[in-house]
Amino acid sequence: MSQQLETINYIDSSLYKKYDVKRGLRNSNGTGVLVGLTNIGAVEGYKIDENKNKVPIKGKLYYRGYEIQDLVKSYIAEDRFGFEEVTYLLIFGELPTKSQLNSFKEYISKKRELPPDFARDMILTTPSRSIMNKLARSVLALYCYDENPDDTSITNVLRQSIDLIGYFPALLAYAYQAKSSYFDNKTLHIRNPLPELSTAENILRMLRPHGKYTDLEAKCLDICLVLHAEHGGGNNSAFTIHLVSSSGTDTYSAISAGIGALKGPKHGGANIQVIKMIKDLKANVKDINDHKAVDEYLIKVLKKQANDKSGLIYGMGHAVYTLSDPRAVLLKGLAKKLAENTDHVDDYLLCEYIEERTEELYEQVHGTRKTMCANVDLYSGLVYTLLNIPHDIATPLFALARLSGWAAHRIEELSSGNKLIRPAYMSVAEKKEFVPLSKREPFSLKDFLNRTK
Ligand SMILES: CC(=O)SCCNC(=O)CCNC(=O)[C@H](O)C(C)(C)COP(=O)(O)OP(=O)(O)OC[C@H]1O[C@@H](n2cnc3c(N)ncnc32)[C@H](O)[C@@H]1OP(=O)(O)O
Ligand SMILES: O=C([O-])CC(=O)C(=O)O
């Protein structure tokens, strides 16, 4: 029956050209179809020249007009946590004053504790191997604990968004604890969040059996959260938020849909896929410093003969960035610093080698050159290893950080979208006459192909 599904669902790719369908909402030069306007994040990865050709450039990312490097550099220089400030910036559109930031942090800190018995009833009873799956279900379950869940007024959506931002570290940490205890036979540690701690500190406190972490570990995790918080309106999960919000549905439905989109291996889930790919590479290549052997492995990946046989080198390529992804540049620098004088120098060099070689090996295998840079997911897994953060939560950390951007995009859609997002699909199906049950014949591939020729 699945063969039948493949047959009846096949659409000849020449039809897309014939009817000028923008597959994947992409123009013929690979750029995205313009479908919206946003004030939140700006992603710049190419220029269009006077002949309408796409010209690769170094990538830039702005949050509400501020360049990501400037934000990160200032948090490092001022030796302070930046994620709460970035959340404020994304939602309210301006950098906060000291007192605005303090009140915002105080407000979030009051929402750190989950509703009474939520952890017991909603997280520990039905653990999942996938923490992303558990997070989506937890967000949906929070609908039942909200006395005003369906009100889409901005005041109410803002309250719901900040509640979720406050709850997320505990949702993530308890989902991880439930998974580790139930599936990996580890001791269950349930530690309360502390209101005076930053998001990064609370995550580390609740994740670790002893609840301890260093200031450096927390500040590095904070940088990772800052870097993952927002990426414009067109990325798959933010667009999902716009799409779902445009129907007028509730905040919990919209955010859980965003989590589902981010989980995919071509989007946020790529960070876990990079970790798995490197594990597979190490299992198949005796010496990871042997460049020839690494090349051979990567060629097999590209030929769909190795790893998950998708043909993808995870952590490489991007829909917008061409020469560089500014987040990958920053994470690479962080990974290099953290790896120095540890056993992980070779792991760092391996990621760097994959970054250097992908374009050329892609050309060798496919015969066409594609400009491809490391994306945010290539080095993040290594940074988490170096921070002693379990790999299971790599994508969930992405979701926790991106929740700030999603909240801003949902509020933007509700404030300025004002139109149900509803693109067109042209039907290419044949029209048929109804056949009574007694006269039907089983599906025949031959008949089907004859009819659809
Ligand atoms: C947070 C984020 O979402 S960042 C992205 C994380 N995702 C990954 O790291 C997964 C690997 N990368 C990819 O799959 C892609 O680069 C994407 C989906 C991110 C972006 O893709 P796009 O730039 O839109 O390119 P597109 O999907 O049109 O691909 C063009 C061709 O290059 C191939 N390609 C793109 N990236 C890669 C890659 N990393 N490895 C192998 N082939 C690749 C595609 O398979 C496609 O081949 P096809 O024309 O034969 O179908
Ligand atoms: O912009 C994209 O397509 C994907 C991405 O990097 C992100 O969402 O962070």
Image (cartoon, rainbow, N blue to C red):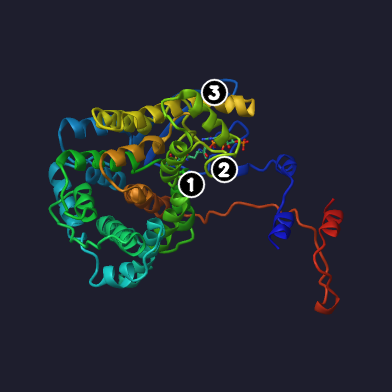
Q: Nearer the viewer, residue 130 or 301?
A: 301
Q: Nearer the viewer, mark 2 or mark 1?
A: 2
Whether residue 30 is visible, yes or no, is yes
Residue 117 lies left or right of residue 9; in this view the side is: left
The amino acid type, in three-letter code, at marker 2 is: Ser
Residue holding disc 1: 265
Q: Quadrant of residue 185?
A: bottom left
Q: Residue at x 33, y 71 (%)?
A: 125
Mark found first going from the N terminus, 3 or 2: 2
Q: Residue at x 49, y 54 (%)?
A: 243
Q: How far across and down, in percent of the image, does residue 344 sit?
A: 31, 33
Q: Within 10 angstroms of label 2, few (less than 14), some, or many (20 or more) residues?
A: few
Q: How far across and down, in percent of the image, does residue 294 sit?
A: 48, 29
Q: Secondary structure at mark 2?
A: loop
The amino acid type, in three-letter code, at marker 1 is: Pro
Q: Residue at x 76, y 57 (%)?
A: 429
Residue reaching furthest to the bottom: 438
Residue holding disc 2: 310
**Do callouts 3 and 1 mark residues in contact (Cβ within 8 Å)?**
no
Mark seen at residue 360: 3
Residue reaching furthest to the front: 286
Real-space CA distance between mark 3 and mark 2, rounded to the nearest whole angstrom: 19 Å
The amino acid type, in three-letter code, at marker 3 is: Glu
Whether residue 242 is visible, yes or no, is no
Location of residue 141 with respect to 380 vertically, above or below: below
**Do callouts 2 and 1 mark residues in contact (Cβ within 8 Å)?**
yes
